[in-house]
Image: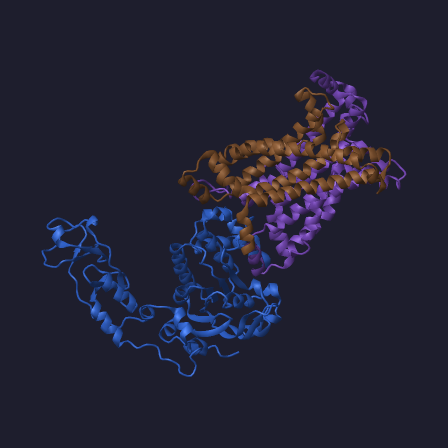
Amino acid sequence: MIRFDAVTKQFPGGTVAVDELTLTAPTGKITVLVGPSGCGKTTSLRMVNRMIEPTRGTITLDGQDTGRMNQADLRRGMGYVIQHAGLFPHRTVLDNIGTVPRLLGWDKKKTRDTSRELLERVGLAPELGERYPAQLSGGQQQRVGVARALAADPPVMLMDEPFSAVDPVVREQLQDEFLRLQGELGKTIIFVTHDIDEAIKLGDQVAVLRVGGRLAQVAEPAYLLAHPADDFVADFVGRDRGYRALGFQEAPRLSLHSEPTVVLGERPEPTDAGWLLVVDDDRHPLGWVEPRRIGDRPVAEADLHRGGTVAREHGSLRAALDAALSAPSRRGVVVDGGGVLSGTVLAHEVLNAIETTERPQRDESDPVHGGAAALRGDEDTP
Amino acid sequence: MTWLADNWNTVLTLTWRSLYLAGIPLVLGFVVSIPLGWMASRWSRTYPAIITTTGLLYTIPSLAMFVMMPVLLGTKILDPVNVIVAMTIYTVALLARTVADGLNAVPDDIAQAATAMGYRGARRLFGVELPLAAPVVAAGLRVAAVSNVSIVSVATLIGVSQLGDLLVDGYNRVIWGELLSGIIACVLLALAFDAVIVLGTRAVTPWLRVQAARA
Amino acid sequence: MINSIWAWFTDPVNWQGEDGIPHRTLQHLEYTAMAVLLAAVIAIPLGLWVGHTGRARWLVSLANSVRAVPTLGLLLAATLWLGAYIQSDLAFTLPSILVLGLLAIPPLLAGTYAGIEAVPPAARDAALGVGMTSGQVLRQVEVPNGLPLFMSGLRSAVLQVVATATVAAFVGLGGLGRFLIDGIALGDYPQTAGGAILVAVLAVVLDGVFALVQRGVVSPGLSGRRVGGRGKDSRSVSVEADRSSTDAPTPVAPA
């Protein structure tokens, strides 16, 4: 657990980059620092591993004051991922990954094995191990940067806009894989970004900072979307708050309609319906077809309309609504955990469900910290 | 320094000789290096060949180069042409690479935009690419100019008269005034070349001044 | 004329003894080594310090401005001045070696300093962030990344010294320059031309050797050599890094 206690950073010219920041980053969770340029998010992050020293206040790591620890030792115990990866151009990818183990004195074989394993874990082909960073694409370099941070299995990871420098498609892949990794590893992560959507997607807890380095609000994403503490946070979080908040609410038991189907490659039963759902042999939905265009002949792949998204049975309301809105037939396809068709749902049924769902309770006593109480609660022992 | 006062005219004459013995190769070399550098940057397969050859020429010590000119040109050893040709070769050797690298540094999209607008060949080179490469090329020119002034003083050893004479004569007859005058004159000449090039570059690249002012 | 030069080369007398080609070549190499070492002792630590801490950059500009001084003038002035204080034969060599060392400092300093500066800032930040001490950052990251530019500076320095040592024969230094200077004094053109060819060959060979050393010592990740198979994933590093590894060293004023 990392705790900021009234941490302030004032630079020699007089600029206050971080102003009395008090924040707890719970163990095993992702805490995202987000805000506009000049809000002190990167400065705050860099004070954790003392790349920048605080002017006032303390930062504690599991109760120990980081200011009293040996700097190099502190840093070797934390994974550090930065925006342009910062790989060493003169070392191979594997050697880059093995940097911290090398510093810690691990033996060569163990380092090499760990490096290879991590390379695979971040989704890169083994052949890339002997290449040099200049031969890798931006997304690949970023993955190597993450692997390097993980090499010595540090309990804490500090990540400074690690996915900002790649294009949106790659960024989404990296974010999804990052979440998958975190699901396996459960590290304490402080993550900096300027993108509120990334913050909401990745964070267990989101801290919004305003220009001048003051904490505007810290809360779980759903709470943040539902109860922004003031106008600045409301503006920063942006539009579509309601819609995005749906992404965090599990769909209650929706009553599903059974849906007539046809298996790909077979002839459809005669029907009046404008659209017919096509499935494969295992009843996984593949797409929609228009029966009047097919007529009597077997359904072919070329006939498929793939426009509709598919929602999982206990997934979010947002997915269910999107499935209904995007299907050409206006009937949202719902599948079970194994991807097998469960039934369909209509848009107005999802909306009904939304109206009955409860929003997170607002903590009147502490708008700024209220939304994070649940995460903080079990960590209160110093 | 009394020596300087007494021999002012000589110093001026010799300075003038150094100026053109160093200056002419600078200009000639610059002119020759443009097409060479352009070739090397345009057809990247020729880059290693051109740059390696010019690099090799640059490796040869200047005194050796002066002395070998009579063999190549059929001139007498005392002939100033030896100096001019040798130094032109040096200037080309240095600048070809600078021009090539400067042109290579022009961002691709600008060059392509120019082509799309109808600029081709020489017009594009002189109208777009060279001006943009000017800072890099100018840096090379400055090194070449200062080099040339220093190298040319060595020509006294092969009997070609210029400021180097003051150095050698001052040494031989142990006249410190003369020796020091020679050194200072060379330094001033080098600085003058440098200043002219800097001013010239500024005149040719007005957009850089605006950028600097805004920053 | 070519015949007489060839005759000079094939005359066995010229290959023997103190005035012979082998001995003079060796001398030339010795002087070069001494001067470069002398310069290195000053320029490398200084360059590392300026590059690593970012302070006193004016030192590099100062060193570069030394190039405006004519090398012949420095040689003559130094010999005249210092020669008065030295009794033995050293009076002919020591001032020259000092000047040669002095002239080798600017390219070596510039190369060292530029090399350290050229380290990508992200890599330096990451190095500190993963827990390297300042010394480790220097040794493990900055020096290896600075090698291309450093080698470039080293090659320039060596060429500078080889060239100036040739001229220094005028003030009594031995080495291959002796053939040139003596030949001019005696009006013996074959000797002069022979000396010139020898010096040229020596310079080219020496530079070639250093080029090979550079290739061996600089990491392939920096020099742009193709590594790790074919296909669209295998591509060489940008031209930017390549500049430092091609055969031509960074230009400097030879004398």
C187 vs C63, left or right, is: right
C174 to C141, vertically: above or below: above
The x, y position of residue A183, in whole percent, is: 41, 64
Q: Colour of chain C?
A: purple
The answer to which image quadrant residue C125 occupies is bottom right
Q: Nearer the viewer, residue A194 or B111?
A: B111
- Residue A173 position, x and y percent, is 39, 57
* Left or right position of C29 against A245: right
Outermost residue to the right = C87
User: Judging from the image, what is the letter of the chain drawn in blue?
Assistant: A
**Could you say where residue A30 lies in the image, as x and y percent from the top left?**
44, 68
- What count of labels does the image hold? 0
Q: Judge by depth and name the residue closer to the eye, C193 or C238.
A: C193
Q: Quadrant of residue A358?
A: bottom left
Q: Residue furthest top?
A: C3
**Quarter occupied by residue C98:** top right
Is residue C145 something one can see in this rendering?
yes
| Rendered position, B24 above or below C55 | above
For the rendered model, the colour scheme is: by chain
Where residue B87 sits in the image (x, y, percent)?
66, 31
The answer to whether any part of residue C225 appears in the image is no
Q: Colour of chain B?
A: brown
Residue drawn at x 56%, y 73% is A8
Q: Is residue B194 above or below residue A70?
A: above
